[in-house]
Image (tube, grey):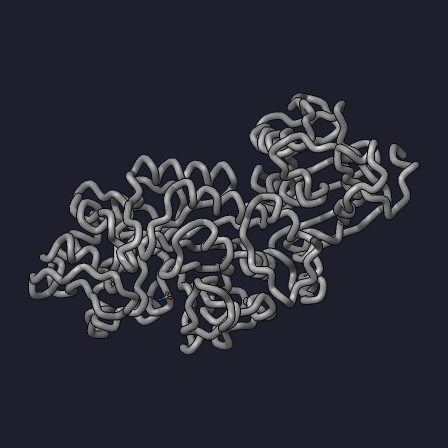
């Protein structure tokens, strides 16, 4: 064993000065196979250790190569090692079609690491696990003097749900592409595989639509958004770049344009989209439920079809979210008429429609229904994404004392509240086999920058990620809080602002 001289409890990350100074600063303990977030399905520690060294290399070929390059790129800065990606190497990534979908197998022996999966996405899941098994210093942007130890054993892992989503609201406050990329970088570490972008609402319109150019010219202008802070929109090129950036991290983007409610920004730009043709005033407040497209006017459907066609054309993923929530200003019969015409438009342009739970009223055959309103029951025979506001909404305040940021209309949500529920049993009237997955939405009324996003998202996003990924048999708050506590230094090192919940034993 290469590290026979190191006792089991040795500090494995030593500051550069450790050799010359008698009292090195405390360094993080080595990770264990039991420290991974979200918890893997099956873990078998062996007691041996693998050390990544100057001589290490990453073996991969064919479709495994991009994942190997991603792994190498994440390991090189802190290790300073060359880590060539080649036909041979002591860290081997291999595709094996006997392993299904997103599952992977990780074998860490004394002299080699073997990561095997059926797809590149599965390999990437294993890579995210591997990154968490290395000392936290692996995330430093500069060379660190450390023993790059990976605990030995085997992990056989696969997701509980195919859909593990995060949502970011760009409408109430526009977050720049760089801020969205930063969020993608963080959520991808926890095996989130969908990013739902809420691109239009009463306060702003954030996506270029060529056939309706005033949408962004007027409602994406500076000053559009809650409190008039910010403004901006994604050009098609910027959107496509984000989609590619996410796809390179095995995350599929789902664009949402909310209809028939939440459309004030569209109507400010195009007054003909109201029933009376009168332009409403631009809104910068946080009220909801007052705007509606006009189900009786043909221009409504021309607008919906143009938007859906252009969104579908710039979105390679299979889903398109058409909103449908809180259409309180739309008479019920009009709502049903509207949805029955608009949901098939997504199909017409090759996409599967997703809608908030209100679309269940419109017989959404083949659509996906997103549960959000925890005060309303949901009855549907369609697939369901579960995101109850009282547990999964990342914009709810942690408690009433939490400093600025967040809402509390659905209550307050501490980290244990976000963790301690079962998406498979949450909806009494929906059978477990219809649960497509979970999502953690983050609405932006109170958000202004990445620090605001991260403070509300972390650690709760990881709680939702674990509900989506890990088998229910592993569900254990005590284990989760320990693992989150041990992860804290990693966020600190990355400059990610997170909520230091008093319920978590932080390891720093
Ligand atoms: C929602 O929170 N109105 C979907």
Task: Say if 437 sits above or below 158 in the image.
Answer: below
Instruction: Give the side of residue 192 with respect to residue 20, left or right.
Output: left
Question: Where in the figure is residue 278, as x and y percent of width and height?
Answer: 7, 62
Decide which of 105, 243 is in the foreground and name it: 243
Task: Locate ligand 1 by image quadrant.
Answer: bottom left
Decide which of 366, 278 is in the foreground and name it: 278
- Total number of numbered discs in the rendering: 0
Question: Where in the figure is residue 325, as x and y percent of width and height?
Answer: 32, 66
Q: Residue at x 44, y 59 (%)?
A: 441
Task: Say if 196 sits above or below 99 in the image.
Answer: below
Report whether residue 240 is seen: yes
Query: Hey, which residue is sitting farthest left in the picture?
Result: 277
Task: Say if 214 sits above or below 63 in the image.
Answer: below
Question: Where in the figure is residue 282, as x and y percent of width and height?
Answer: 18, 59
Question: Where in the figure is residue 12, as x and y percent of width and height?
Answer: 80, 41
Q: Residue at x 51, y 57 (%)?
A: 455
Decide which of 381, 2 is in the foreground and name it: 2
Q: Quarter of the image holding residue 73?
A: top right
Task: Say if 410 sits above or below 131 in the image.
Answer: below
Query: Hey, which residue is sitting farthest right in the picture?
Result: 5
Q: Quarter of the image holding residue 336?
A: bottom left
Q: Quadrant of the N terminus?
A: top right
Report whether residue 384 is seen: no
């Amino acid at each position: 064993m290469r590290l026979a001289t190191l006792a089991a409890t040795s500090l494995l990350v030593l500051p550069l000065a450790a050799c010359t100074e008698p009292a090195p600063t405390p360094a993080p303990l080595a990770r264990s196979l039991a420290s991974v977030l979200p918890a893997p399905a099956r873990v078998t520690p062996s007691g041996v250790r693998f050390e990544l060294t100057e001589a290490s290399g990453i073996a991969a070929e064919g479709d495994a190569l991009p994942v190997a390059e991603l792994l190498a790129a994440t390991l090189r800065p802190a290790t300073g090692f060359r880590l060539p990606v080649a036909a041979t190497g002591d860290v081997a990534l291999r595709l094996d079609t006997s392993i299904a979908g997103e599952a992977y197998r990780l074998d860490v022996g004394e002299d080699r690491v073997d990561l095997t999966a059926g797809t590149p996405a599965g390999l990437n899941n294993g890579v995210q696990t591997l990154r968490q098994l290395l000392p936290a210093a692996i995330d430093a942007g500069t060379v660190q003097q450390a023993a790059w130890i990976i605990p030995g054993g085997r992990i056989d892992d696969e997701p509980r749900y195919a859909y593990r989503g995060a949502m970011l609201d760009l409408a109430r406050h526009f977050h720049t592409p760089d801020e969205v990329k930063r969020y993608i970088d963080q959520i991808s570490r926890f095996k989130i595989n969908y990013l739902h972008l809420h691109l239009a609402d009463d306060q702003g319109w954030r996506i270029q639509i060529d056939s309706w150019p005033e949408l962004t010219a007027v409602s994406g202008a500076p000053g559009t958004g809650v409190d008039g802070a910010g403004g901006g929109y994604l050009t098609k090129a910027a959107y496509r770049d984000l989609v590619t950036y996410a796809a390179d991290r095995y995350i599929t983007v789902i664009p949402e344009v909310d209809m028939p409610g939440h459309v004030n920004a569209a109507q400010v730009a195009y007054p003909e989209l109201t029933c009376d043709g009168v332009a409403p005033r631009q809104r910068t407040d946080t009220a909801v439920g007052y705007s509606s497209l006009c189900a009786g006017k043909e221009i409504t459907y021309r607008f919906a079809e143009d938007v859906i066609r252009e969104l579908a054309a710039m979105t390679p993923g299979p889903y398109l979210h058409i909103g449908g929530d809180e259409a309180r200003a739309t008479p019920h019969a009009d709502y049903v008429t509207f949805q029955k015409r608009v949901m098939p438009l997504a199909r017409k342009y090759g996409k599967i429609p997703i809608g908030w739970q209100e679309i269940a009223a419109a017989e959404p055959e083949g659509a996906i229904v997103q549960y959000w309103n925890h005060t309303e029951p949901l009855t549907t025979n369609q697939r369901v994404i579960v995101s109850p506001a009282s547990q999964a909404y990342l914009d709810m305040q942690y408690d009433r004392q939490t400093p600025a940021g967040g809402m509390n209309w659905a209550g307050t949500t501490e980290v244990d509240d976000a963790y301690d529920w079962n998406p498979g049993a949450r909806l009494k009237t929906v059978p477990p086999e219809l649960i497509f997955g979970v999502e953690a939405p983050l609405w932006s009324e109170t958000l202004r920058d990445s620090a605001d996003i991260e403070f509300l998202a972390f650690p709760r996003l990881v709680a939702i990620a674990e509900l989506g990924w890990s088998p229910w048999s592993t569900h254990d708050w005590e284990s989760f809080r320990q693992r989150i506590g041990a992860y804290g230094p990693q966020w600190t090192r990355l400059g990610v602002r997170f909520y230091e919940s008093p319920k978590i034993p932080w390891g720093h």
